[in-house]
Image (cartoon, helix red, strand yellow):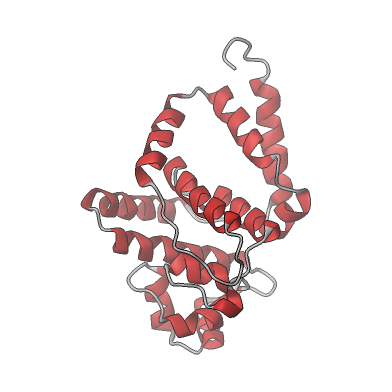
């Protein structure tokens, strides 16, 4: 689990980039967090920056700069990085904002479910979660699995939904979270979240508490 100080610094950087309208900087930062999170999720054996960088055949300093959101890897290094942190190559291409090569362009229900649960775990705020869901929806709806069309993320809509979310009370938020996770199988949760059992137990506990707040739901 990420330490609170690191997450706080990340959110501060992300907010500054959003205020400045620096979409490229935001993309680098979000990509870096994704790589960092997936690397740190590998605990058997533990995956250090040095080890991951060696597997991807780049320097440790290059890997550190990528995780820090200072630059993106070259497209030809994406597959090596994906293998190092054990994620789908196509997913890492999309995270970097690169076009997915035909040989990696596979996106089915299993991939969509995994992207969904990762978004629940990683999104720094509700707006980022909504933006990711737009991406998942558009990729899954594309019928031609070999040729990917361009997709757009409506940040205005995501912002509007985030504003609505902030106006919801705690029980309503819990119900929303439960509704969003109903379509995700337990097998997918276990395969995606390191602490899936704790996640489910905590959510069900909050749902049970929310039921007692009659009139607020």
Q: Position of residue 177 (x, y in %)?
A: 60, 35
Depicted 143 relative to depicted 121: above or below: below
> Which residue occupies the extreme left position in the image?
20
Q: Quadrant of residue 83?
A: bottom right
The answer to whether residue 84 shows anywhere in this view is no
Front-lying residue, 34 or 131: 131
Residue at 60%, 56% (x, y): give it: 140
The answer to whether residue 27 shows anywhere in this view is yes
> Which residue occupies the extreme top position in the image?
215
Depicted 19 relative to depicted 46: above or below: above
Rendered-image quadrant of the N terminus? bottom right
Residue at 68%, 52% (x, y): give it: 195
Q: Position of residue 174 (x, y in %)?
A: 60, 30
Q: Quadrant of residue 190?
A: bottom right
Q: Position of residue 136 (x, y in %)?
A: 55, 54
> Which residue occupies the extreme right position in the image?
187
**Is residue 114 rendered to the left or right of residue 170?**
right
**Is residue 31 rendered to the left or right of residue 217?**
left
* Count of marks placed on residues: 0
Residue at 67%, 23% (x, y): give it: 209
Depicted 59 relative to depicted 150: above or below: below
Depicted 15 relative to depicted 180: above or below: below
Front-lying residue, 39 or 92: 92
Residue at 60%, 79% (x, y): give it: 103
Rendered-image quadrant of the C terminus? top right
């Amino acid at each position: 689990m990420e330490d609170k100080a690191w997450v706080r610094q990340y959110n501060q950087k992300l907010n500054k980039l959003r205020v400045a309208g620096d979409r490229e900087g935001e993309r680098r930062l979000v990509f870096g967090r994704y790589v960092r999170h997936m690397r740190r999720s590998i605990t058997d054996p533990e995956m250090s920056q040095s080890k991951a960088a060696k597997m991807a055949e780049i320097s440790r300093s290059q890997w550190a700069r990528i995780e820090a959101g200072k630059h993106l890897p070259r497209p030809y290094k994406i597959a090596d990085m994906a293998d190092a942190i054990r994620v789908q190559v196509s997913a890492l291409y999309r995270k970097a904002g690169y076009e997915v090569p035909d040989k990696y362009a596979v996106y089915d229900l299993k991939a969509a479910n995994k992207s969904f649960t990762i978004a629940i775990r990683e999104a720094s705020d509700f707006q980022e979660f909504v933006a990711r869901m737009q991406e998942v929806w558009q990729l899954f709806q594309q019928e031609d699995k070999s040729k990917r069309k361009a997709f757009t993320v409506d940040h205005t809509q995501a912002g509007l939904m985030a504003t609505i979310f902030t106006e919801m009370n705690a029980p309503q938020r819990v119900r929303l979270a439960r509704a969003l996770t109903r379509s995700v199988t337990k097998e997918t949760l276990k395969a995606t979240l390191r602490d899936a059992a704790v996640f489910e137990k905590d959510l069900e506990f909050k749902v049970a508490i929310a039921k007692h707040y009659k009139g607020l739901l």
